[in-house]
Amino acid sequence: MSRNGETAEVTERASSRTRIRAVPDPFLVVCRCFSVITSVTAILCIAVNVLSAIRSFKDGSDIFNGIFRCYAVVLALFVVLAETEWGFIVKFWKVLEYWAGRGMLQIFVAVMTRAFPDYSAKQRDLVLLQNIASYMLLACGVVYIISGILCIGFLKRKRQQKETTREQAFKDLEELERRRGELEQLLMQERV
């Protein structure tokens, strides 16, 4: 009977050790939140440019504005993909790995979104959306450029590597504790 009590105690001790979890890095949480804000702003730029392109092509009056808006949509998609830090994008466009490069791209998309506004009364809502989207993305781009100059992106990459290493260490520890518990149970069973 005491053997079963010892086994339960060993299992409880092993499971209590594996419940320890690291607290997420507040700096990385802030970076992720800012990345989400930038992505949402870029998506707003995409929507505004698509609406503007549709109106330009529908009216047929300004085909060049419609083509310009299509290019703005494609570049805004690159902004969204850069914010996801998808390996494929970073691999082929190394400049987007650096925050100053991302900031310049975001500012360029903001300028493209703001360019050629049509101030007619019937498109006032679209112009307002263009202004909001372009200024928000412009602000994000300026923050990225300043952060890039201050090497915040480098600091973020180092902390991400540290977090990944820490997570792997916790997974390895959990696996070792699980194996230890199994071996202790087998040892207890063999003693019986």
Image (cartoon, rainbow, N blue to C red):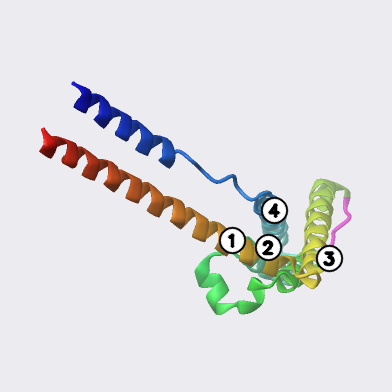
Q: Are marks 1 and 4 in contact (CB under 8 Å)?
A: no
Q: Residues within 10 Å of mark 4 (few under 14, many from 20)?
A: few
Q: Are marks 3 and 1 in contact (CB under 8 Å)?
A: no
Range of residues picked out in magenta: 116-120
Could you tell me how far apart the alpha carbons at marks 4 and 3 are, in whole angstroms? Answer: 38 Å
Q: Amino acid at mark 1?
A: Gln
Q: Are marks 2 and 4 in contact (CB under 8 Å)?
A: no
Asked which secondary structure carries label 2, the reply is helix
Which quarter shows the N terminus? top left
Could you tell me how far apart the alpha carbons at marks 1 and 4 are, in whole angstroms? Answer: 10 Å
Could you tell me how far apart the alpha carbons at marks 2 and 3 are, in whole angstroms? Answer: 15 Å
Point 85% across, 58% down: residue: 118
Q: Amino acid at mark 4?
A: Phe
Nearer the viewer's eye, disc 2 or disc 3? 3
N-terminal-most mark, 2 or 4: 4
N-terminal-most mark, 4 or 3: 4
N-terminal-most mark, 1 or 4: 4
Q: Are marks 2 and 1 in contact (CB under 8 Å)?
A: no
| Residue 92, percent from left and from top | 55, 78
In this figure, which residue is indicated by the disc labeled 4? 27
Q: Residues within 10 Å of mark 2 (few under 14, many from 20)?
A: some
